[in-house]
Amino acid sequence: MNRTELPVNETVVAAQMAALCVPDARRVDDILSRALEMKGLDPADAGVLSMVTDENQLSKMYAAAAKVKEQIYGKRLVLFAPLYISNLCRNECTYCAFRASNKALHRRALSMEEIDRETVSLLKEGHKRVLLVAGESYPKEGFRYVLRAVEAVYAARYNNANIRRVNVNVAPLSVEEFRELKAAQIGTYQLFQETYHPATYHTVHLKGAKSDYGYRLSAIDRAMEAGIDDVGIGVLFGLHDWRFELLAMLQHVAHLERRFGVGPHTISIPRLEPASGAPLSVNPPHPVSDTDFRKLIAILRLTVPWTGIILSTRERADMRRESFSLGVSQISAGSRTNPGGYSTKEEENASQFSLGDHRPLDEVIRDVAAMGYLPSFCTACYRLGRTGADFMDLAKPGAIRHHCDPNAVSTLKEYLVDYASPQTRTVGEACIADQLPRMDEVAHKRTLAMLERVQAGQRDVFC
Ligand code: SAM
Ligand code: SF4
């Protein structure tokens, strides 16, 4: 792809940025009433909303986002854990502790036995969904290392439990390699552009393959060309103006929808966190305030209502709590960002960045359930082939709720029976009891039947 064919055109974004001004209340009301139709908004609308500062208008925006979120996702919140398999890296991303020049970092690439141990540790906690993460350099065998790692995660067992979905966040690949990744039965391929602003991109990616802006930006296209129809995009917020990143990301979404008939399955919104040996991370050039961050989440929810929004443990517990009603639909929990961190529990100098939320999974589940949200470990869609456009065909008319709600309840029930502390079990059971009467007849009936099967000892019950 040459520069003019890339999914995002900087000049277009710059023109949209130049047109931004603080909107009057009528304009905001008009956009919000259209957003409530849940058909999404144009990038221009998103730009207008990004300029809102009036407290009253902001409250209306958050209320609209909460309404859209609830209509589409109900109370469900999907949980996963990152699994860092290696921190070897050839690149020089000035914000990341894994950067090649960080000699103080303890480097390691986990062996397949170690990956098995890590996975078993996650299984013992009750996890079912994993995001496999690696730096951009592999042991001798090259990219095959990632394929073997995916296989090792799926193969790991603890008391008959296994990881049911492995999503992957690794360096951009060729179409051929993406085909191999698809054949390894991954869930989502996830890749963050970090910044869509080319000049900033080149300032912070000094060396290695990642310094090629275009190769990274075209990676999601290659993944989709290879048949991976479940992709995740993201920005590392703090590197450049968040409004520019938002508008550029929406252009990326529109490009994928145009070219492949379906946009990204998820959008991740990491904010830059302090990382050892990476001074830029301590002093982000464009820090995103909590107020702007709330706005960003709400705008994304209103603009791309059917796209999952992922928030990691980079964020503090209080921001994570707030984010659920604003639009976040997936969170990680109990995370470690150093390879081997789950099974060794060592606080060695090998982590990628510092975390804002250190609570174990059990505590996060208890908290989420006590807030009235429904923690879910569901992996049904991907295993039944409901991905990409097929997923959207089911999701947009609302029929997906007849699957999501029962699956959320059955996976939560499994968690409560097999892994939860007594305290969490009590809160979780109350949460299930609270959800049942809210379901429509189809979902309610299905859920009761599935709960019975879980109660009787069956596992991995889904529809
Ligand atoms: N090495 C691959 C890459 O760069 O795409 C994949 C894994 S990388 C470890 C995953 C993500 O971590 C990066 O895409 C980046 O957005 C994020 N990251 C790096 N340094 C960070 C920091 N200091 N704070 C928050 N997120 C960070
Ligand atoms: Fe390496 Fe990824 Fe960190 Fe960059 S962000 S230094 S590519 S691990």
Image (cartoon, grey):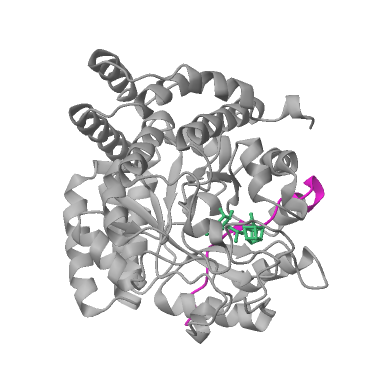
- In this rendering, position of residue 380 left or right of residue 200: left
Whether the magenta-drawn stretch holds residue 49 is answered as no
Most foreground residue, 287 or 460: 287
Most foreground residue, 358 or 425: 358
Magenta extent: 159-178
Q: Residue 377 is drawn in which quadrant?
A: bottom left
Residue at 51% across, 32% down: 244
Q: Residue 156 is drawn in which quadrant?
A: bottom right
- Residue 95 at least partly seen: yes
- Where is residue 415? Give x, y as percent: 34, 70
- Residue 157 at least partly seen: no
- Where is residue 189? Give x, y as percent: 62, 51
Give the quadrant of ligand 1. bottom right
- Where is residue 280? Give x, y as percent: 54, 56
State how many labels appear: 0
148 lies above or below 392: below
262 lies above or below 282: above
Whether the magenta-drawn stretch holds residue 175 is answered as yes
